Image: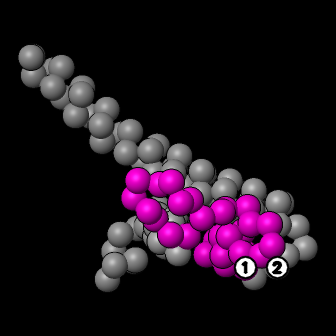
Amino acid sequence: MRASTQFRNRAWRISATPLIVAEGALIVLALERFLRIVLAERATGSDTLHNLLEKAASGDDPLLPARRDSPLRASNELTIKLLTTVRNVTMHGVRAHFL
């Protein structure tokens, strides 16, 4: 591979990273907005993504029912924790979340 091709590939990867992070942030914001619309009056203005996911997973007719057939047997609590961690890292960065 030529040096110029290597440089272009490396430059593309570096310039694509902010776009990937922005796309992830947009998806998380869309999920949060979707939950606010679907939950309607159950959602308050101060609810975080974690609270919205808990409300969606609870109640008589949950939007996020527990999956018994999942190969990982992940519980709703684990799923909520993973989604909120992804949101926090995407929005605030790794350092802000883990340090």
Residue 45 placed where, x, y %?
80, 78
Q: Is residue 46 left or right of residue 93?
A: right
Is 25 or 77 nearer to us in this picture? 77
Mark 1 is surrounded, within 10 Å at the Cα level, by few (under 14), some (14 to 19) or many (20 or more) other residues, namely some
Location of the C terminus (image quadrant): bottom left
Above or below for 23 versus 47: above
Is 34 or 69 nearer to us in this picture? 69
Mark 2 is surrounded, within 10 Å at the Cα level, by few (under 14), some (14 to 19) or many (20 or more) other residues, namely few
Q: Secondary structure at mark 2?
A: loop
Which image quarter: residue 94?
Answer: bottom left
Looking at the image, which residue sits at the far right? 41
Query: Callout 2, which amino acid?
Result: Thr
Above or below for 4 versus 82: above
Location of the N terminus (image quadrant): top left
Scheme by which the image is coloured: one colour
Q: Secondary structure at mark 1?
A: loop
Which circle marks residue 44 in the picture? 2
Q: Tell me, yes or no, whether the two marked residues, 2 and 1, touch with CB atoms within 8 Å.
A: yes
Who's the residue at 53% across and 46% down the image? Answer: 23
Who's the residue at 85% across and 76% down the image? Answer: 42
What residue would you read off at disc 1?
Answer: 47
What stretch of residues is rendered in magenta? 47-76
Who's the residue at 24% across and 26% down the image? Answer: 8
Above or below for 8 versus 75: above
